[in-house]
Amino acid sequence: MIAKRAAEMTSFIVMDVLEKAHEMERQGIDIIHLEVGEPDFDTPQCIKDAAEKALKDGHTHYTHSLGMIELREAICEYYSNTYAVTIDPDQIIVTSGTSPAMFMLFSTLLEENDEVIISDPHYACYPNFIKFLKGTPVTVAVYEDDGFQYRTAAIKEKISKKTKGIFINSPSNPTGNLLSAERMQKIAQLSPYIISDEIYHGLVYGDKEHSIFEFTDRAFVFNGFSKLYAMTGFRLGYVIAPKPFIRPMQKIQQNFFISANAMVQMAGIAALKYAHNDVTAMKNTYDQRRKYIIKRLREIGFGITKEPTGAFYVFANAKHLGLDSYKLAFEILENAHVGVTPGIDFGQNGEGYIRFSYANSLENIKEGMRRIEAYLKIRA
Ligand SMILES: Cc1ncc(COP(=O)(O)O)c(C=O)c1O
């Protein structure tokens, strides 16, 4: 009854943890959420005001299928100011979050059985997009002692005639680590297109992230407003692509999605123009939490070889607690009442790790660490 492509889709395990946590909360149990991959901050006021004003001003209709020109121009300005790269507004399609942008790009790029290289571990949804659109994800293992960075030699070994793209994600979900400029430069010189998910750009602490466009134009960029501007529920993102790909993707947008939400696009313009101070404040707070959680996780016995300097995740080695990260995550939830995400959610090579999100208050993180420490002391 159910089509194969839908039946074969794997669930997002973090959602299983979250659902179990919600069930426990309904029974009156207090849970600390360190599993969730979204900012705990309220959306900055200037963004909410712009959305409200847009609604009052009648921005309640379809927009251009590529997105409002003012927003596309603001995105170009942002890339120019941040990375000194030149992007034309006609290279951008504004979408309802980066997720539909991934759907549109892989629909345009992949013939049946074409391959896309992804790191292992990787953001859980990448292989599902690729497989759903009849491509084949090919994994390249990345390792803790190397800061979970790609090795160019390992990528080269996996490139075949069918390789259409190499997916990079820096800062990365789940590892919180960055790809160095040197490695990006080398990867950019390989022949397939580079597909760069830049959604965690801006959330970088004492380090510097790079856009793939600093190294090559043979690239696609996904970016969005969910993380940096705490706008997950607005659903706003975009894809930047070489011009020949825009028209085919635009047709997919027109047929399947028509346009991104008009008032949300107005909010996106405000985010890019006026939310700088709010972003700085959120970033400073994330950084405080990051330092604290790394210190405490190490004290409790988790392994963190290279300190993560981006996004809001720590991917901690928990192999001393047994290899089954799925079981361990549920064990921690049920006994310590702390939600965490099992590494296996992010690929085979993520097994033995636990992802901790510090998108929660310092007070809650402190309590979460206290609970986990207490539980692990009495664990058999
Ligand atoms: C690496 C990565 N890419 C994309 C997304 C999806 O973002 P959006 O809300 O823009 O669809 C997420 C969300 O967790 C993510 O972690």
Image (tube, rainbow, N blue to C red):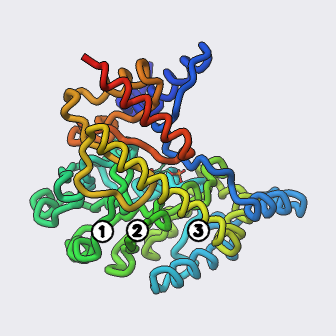
**Circle 2 residue:** 220
Q: Earlier in the sequence, mark 2 or mark 1?
A: 1
Q: Residues within 10 Å of mark 1 (few under 14, many from 20)?
A: many
Q: Is residue 257 above or below residue 319?
A: below
Q: Amino acid at mark 3?
A: Thr
Quarter-of-image position of residue 208: bottom left
Q: Earlier in the sequence, mark 3 or mark 2?
A: 2
Q: Nearer the viewer, residue 10 or 122?
A: 122
Q: Residues within 10 Å of mark 2 (few under 14, many from 20)?
A: many
User: From mark 1 to mark 3, how far is it between C-alphas?
Assistant: 33 Å
The quadrant of the image that shows the N terminus is top left
Where disc 1 sits, the SS reads strand
Q: Residues within 10 Å of mark 3 (few under 14, many from 20)?
A: some
**Circle 3 residue:** 280
The residue lying furthest to the right in this view is: 56
Q: Can residue 342 be seen in this snapshot?
A: yes
Where disc 3 sits, the SS reads helix
